Structure formats: structure tokens, C-alpha cells
Amino acid sequence: MRIIEIHNLPEAEAELLKIKADRQGIKIMAPKAVFRAVKIEKLSPTQSNIIKQEMLALGGEAAVSRGSINHSEKEGGALLLGTLQQFEDLIKKLRQHCFRLPDMAKELETVLKNYTAPLSLKIGGKTWPLGKKTYIMGILNVTPDSFSDGGLFFDHEKAIAHGMKMIEEGADIIDIGGESTRPGATPVSIKEEVRRIVPVVKKLAKELPVSIDTSKSIVTQAALEAGAVMVNDVSGFHRDPKMAKIAAKFNATVTIMHMQKHPHYFDLIGNIISYLKEGLAIARNAGILNNQIIVDPGFGFGKSVEGNLEILRRLKELKVLGHPLLVGTSRKSFIGKTLNLPVEERIEGTIATVVLAIQNGADIIRIHDVKEMKRSAKMADKIIRRRRI
């Protein structure tokens, strides 16, 4: 006798086949073998009570706020616990109600689908299949003051040489930045940032896809004109209103990252999802296509050590957004504080975070040490992705 973990329908079907279940029965039983816990926020008391009663009637479980039961609060939340089959039946029930519950049913259906749906990503006019391997984004800071490699590649020739080395070691993308985003870094003028990055972009873009790490639309345009095909905006399109439009104009793939000023939050994952949804709306309104958008929870940007660790543990929850996940934990301070190690000795800690990120749904890892992380990701992929969709 043993307990097995089933994460999705293919795994459920595989386990049922192993016990030689009837094939027609497998189609019926598989959705009953996969469990989900779904959190819904900002529900009216009426919505909360209807959803709870319908879920309970289907044999699932539902918890709502006390204020929703006695109508003492205008809004509350709900936590629904059930199998995929129960959620499928709940969606059908909610479609028959009023009180905006049909809209809730549509959103619930989308969230459940996004959580396990296979995705694809378009970069530079080519489609990159996701789910079979982890892609490596090498970090190249053409700056004198970045937290990890500041000053090492400030010279154009050194930067290009390091970029070529990362390509040889297996990088799939190079992310080039001309201004440090670490806390307390000295701001850089647009003219200086462009001067730093354009020659490097021009050279490396001939070899593989290049991403520009900036939150300034003028710098973005200069990089895209020089050959970059991706935009990595740490502000998640919240800082410069022209960023998304410039990216759309050049048909660039974009990374929308979460950031905040202070590590204070009641619901960290909820905050991240809400912020990223705002950035996604900006991107879509500008004309950026869904298969050209990546999301990044923003490790280190306004998070405590425990906050960063929580994101790693719960990373897969961001899959509900329906976009590939990029994770950038490389040499970050939360690793240093956890292990009490300086920047140059954080490679093992970074490997641990990279492997856990892949386990929990990361599609792209943004790192400094390409050779070591490429090997770690390849090993993790062999273990983890063989059971994925």
C-alpha cells in the first residue's frame, strides 16, 4: 500500500492504466483523481453563499468569510476545495445563476485551464515550445555598479566577449542591462544607458535572441532598432507609459515583472498576481500578443528573505495567469542572507533555487553562471519534465 501524488489528468490516466482500469472508465475517473484548491477574492455575500452551497452540493468543500454568512461585510473571500470533476460541475451550475456568477464561471474555467495548459512562446518570429525544457537567459550587465558583476563588463569589448562565452556555455537568450536596478544604485541618463548597450546588442543579436533590461522607452527603442527582440521591464509597464507601445511597434516579446518598494504585504502571491494582471492589461491594450508575454514574480524587488522563499514554494500559483514564468534568483541577497555568504559564493544556493523553480513551473531562468545552471536545469528537466504535459 502506498500514497501517490497526481498533479494532472495525464498522470491520473497513467495511474489508472497501470491498474488495468477500463478505458471508458478512465475518462470518467481521471478528473476525479486530480484535486485543486481555488481561492476567490472580492465576492459579495450573495455570491459567496451561492458558490458555497453549490460546491457543497457537489460533494466538494467551501469556506467563506464569517462576514459573508451574516452579510456584515460588503466583500469577502472563498476557498474552494474539490476535484477537477467537481469544479467542472460547479462551472456549469454557476452559468445558470445571476449576480454576475456566469462571469465568475468563465474566470474559474480559465484559471483551471491556465494552471496546466501547455504554452508556447514566440521570440524573434520563432515559436519556442514550452514544457519540455528550461530555457537559459544569461545576464550581461554593462554597468559599473550592478550588485553581482558591476564593472566586470563595463567595457564594450569585455561585455561582448562575456556574452559570446555565455552563448558557448549554452545560453538561449542574453539579457543586456545598462543601468543597475539594485537598491540605492545611481540613476543613469538615457544617453549614457543607450551608449552602454547599443554596441553590445548589435554584436550579440547576430548570434541569438537578445533581451533589453530597461524601464525606459527611448532606451528600449534604441535596443530594438539595434537588433534586440525582447524587452525585460522590471517595472512591469507601470513606470513609462510608452514602453508597451514601443514593444508592440517592434513586435517584441516582453517580460512583465513584479516590483514593490517595501517588503510589507498581507498576501504576497495575491499582490504579485494583481500587479502582473495590471501589466498584462497594459501590454494587451498596446497590441502585444498573448504568446509574446512572459511574467516574472520579481525575486528581490521589495521582498523579505521569507517572502522570496515563499514565492519559490508557491511559484506554480502564478500559472493561473496563462503565461510562461521567468525566474531570476541568481546570486540574490536572500540566498546570501540565508547561507551567510558573499555574492561570489552563492552558486550552490542559486542551483537549489533554480531546481525548485523548475519543479514549481519555471520556464525560463535568468542567471549569471550559465555553464553550471545549464547543467543543473538539464538534470532537473530529466527528472521533472518527463511527467509534464
Image: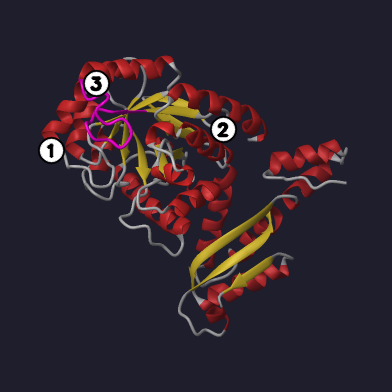
Q: Which residue is mark 2?
A: 131
Task: Answer whether residue 151 is magenta in the image.
Answer: yes
Closest to the observer, 109 or 277: 277
Residue for point 52% across, 78% down: 45
Residue for point 88% across, 46% down: 1
Q: Position of residue 313 (x, y in %)?
A: 55, 49
Of mark 2 and mark 1, the one earlier in the sequence is: 2
Q: Which residue is mark 1?
A: 189
Give the secondary structure at mark 2: loop
Q: For residue 200, which numbered disc appears in the image?
A: 3
Q: Check if mark 3's residue and mark 2's residue have beta carbons within 8 Å.
A: no
Query: Separation of disc 2 and disc 1 at Cα?
Result: 39 Å
Q: Which range is magenta? A: 139-155
Q: Is residue 320 visible?
A: no
Residue type, numbered disc 1: Ser
Q: For residue 44, which numbered disc appears in the image?
A: none
Residue for point 87% across, 41% down: 21
